[in-house]
Every structure is written in structure tokens, then in C-alpha cells.
Amino acid sequence: MNDLEDYFNKNTGRVITKWSHYFDVYDRHFSKFRGKDIVLLEIGTLHGGSLQMWKHYFGDKAKIYGIDINPNCKEVEEENVTILTGSQSDRKFLQRVKNEIPPIDILIDDGGHTMLQQIVTFEELFDHIKPEGIYLCEDMHTAYWTKFGGGLKRKGSAIEYSKNFIDQLNAYHSEQNSFKENSFTRSVNSLHYYDSILVIEKKPTPKPTNGSTGTLTISEPEKPALKGFDLLKEKARYKVRRRLNRIAGFFSLPLQNGDFI
Ligand SMILES: C[S@@+](CC[C@H](N)C(=O)[O-])C[C@H]1O[C@@H](n2cnc3c(N)ncnc32)[C@H](O)[C@@H]1O
């Protein structure tokens, strides 16, 4: 059991509401920030118990911010804990937040959990995360709950929206002019999907290079030596296949039997 889970289990103070499997995820991604001079923002503060948990876990140098739509949440402010009142789906409010709080090391979205809220928050605040910071969105299972705007593979759900991050993470390798690297590709090092949680770890990420080192040890398998017309036929077949595959790839046609044409 890690320190966060231990704190949660022993908590008799302000209410904290978390799923039990979240603590491993938090500790895995957050532990390197402990004891450091960090800025943490949690969207959705409720009774303020989770903000106190973060304060305890990260230590006295951490500046903890909470956002909640409920103005009464302001009451849980204390030393190093500041509450901002507003809605996470209000773009203008979030733009003001960026002027009010310093760049963020860790953002936890535990607010209203609707598709719009999760997407707008990402779109407005992701560029306010520091270059080596972390964006964590939790309770993403609402993407499968209709009352939150979800549904399996429903266009516009936060999970469907986030699947584009996978493409963008790999965009340096695109052969299509319509799909190129962007600031997400250049600033994100990895995506971590868990049950209900997506963690985006930032790190300046230039175009990767590929190389080989060492000595060749394995010889190529012998191929039947084709000659004359058979060789020409094989070369032509290979060329046609490659060209067809490029056309199919360009139009994103489905693969045949999992293989290229
Ligand atoms: C799940 S609770 C937060 C729990 C808290 N983080 C904890 O771990 O104990 C969700 C909170 O999000 C707030 N909320 C709901 N809709 C919101 C919105 N549009 N913008 C900001 N906060 C919102 C609610 O008022 C509520 O306090």
C-alpha cells in the first residue's frame, strides 16, 4: 500500500472520494514530484479532502489549487491551498485561471466528468502544463455512460477524442501531408491508459532518429534465384503491390486479412 492509499484509508478529516485503484496510478506518476516546489491543480474539490491529501503527500513546498463550480468550496482554503470558483466548461473562466495561477506541474481533472467538461478543460489548460508536467483525467468511464454524454465509440466522447492523441503521438512518422506533427507531438512523451484514467506525460520530444550499432551476426536466408522472365514478373508484382498499398494507405482503406495488399 502506498502513502496516498494509507492516508485515504486512515482519513477521518474532510471527505475524499476516490476509486481504490487510482492510488497506484497516482503514486506511479506523481512520486517523483514529492518534496518539490510544485504547482498542482485539481478540478473538482468537493469537501477539500483530496486537496489536503495532496498537500500531505507532496509536502510544504507544493502550491495546491482547486477549481469548483460550487462557491462554498472556497471555505476549504488554507495555507498553500487556493480555491478558484468557476466552471471547467467555461473557456473564458479557464483563460482567466491561466493568468491567475503559475504553470502547472500536475493537473487532475476530477470535476463534473461530462464529455464537454473534460474536453474543454483539456483544450484550454493543456498548454498551461509545464514542459515536464502531467495531465491526469480521471473517471473517464463516464465516456460509456449515456447520462454523461457517453456511449461505446460515440463520436464526441472524451475517450473517442483522446484516441486522436495516439495518432498525434506518432505523427512524426506520417506519410500523409494532411497529418503532420503538432505541438502535442513535440511536447508529449507518453500516454498511459488505465481503467477510467488517462495520464499524459509531457516532455520535449524532438523527431526521433533511428540507427544500428554492432556487428552483423545472422546471414540472410537464401532466396530461390529467379532468372529471366520470372525475375521480371516478380519485380513487377512487387512494384504493383507497393503502389496499390500506397493508394490504399492514402485513402485509409481497411487492411485485407490484417496484412497490406
Ligand atoms: C467527484 S467530486 C470531486 C471529488 C474530490 N476531488 C475528491 O477527490 O474528494 C466533483 C466536484 O466537481 C464539481 N463540479 C461539477 N461540475 C463542475 C464544473 N462544471 N466545473 C467545476 N467543478 C465542477 C462538483 O461541485 C464537485 O465538487
Image (cartoon, rainbow, N blue to C red):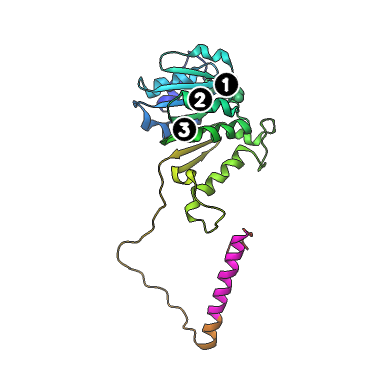
Q: Residue at x 31, y 61 (%)?
A: 213
Mark positioned earlier in the residue sequence (1 or 2):
1
Q: CA distance from mark 1 to mark 2?
A: 9 Å
Viewer can see residue 130: yes
Whole-percent x, y for residue 209 in the image? 39, 56
In this view of the protein, which residue sits in the foreground, 252 or 186? 186
In this picture, residue 58 sits left or right of residue 18:
left
Q: Assess mark 2: CB under 8 A from ligand 1?
A: no
At mark 1, the secondary structure is loop
Q: Residue 169, image x and y in percent?
A: 49, 47
Which residue has dot 3 on it? 128
Q: Which residue is mark 2?
A: 97
Classify mark 3: helix, strand or loop: helix
Q: Amino acid at mark 3?
A: His
Which span is picked out in magenta?
234-251
Looking at mark 1, is its residue's CB closer than 8 Å to ligand 1?
A: yes
- In the image, is 234 to the left or to the right of 153? left
Q: Which quarter of the rendered image does ligand 1 occupy?
A: top right
Q: Is residue 235 magenta?
A: yes
Q: Are marks 3 and 2 in contact (CB under 8 Å)?
A: yes
Tell me which amino acid carries mark 2. Answer: Val
The reply to whether the C-beta atoms of the residues labelled 1 and 3 are less than 8 Å apart is: no
Quadrant housing residue 60: top left
Image quadrant holding the N terminus, namely top left
Disc sitting over residue 86 in the figure: 1
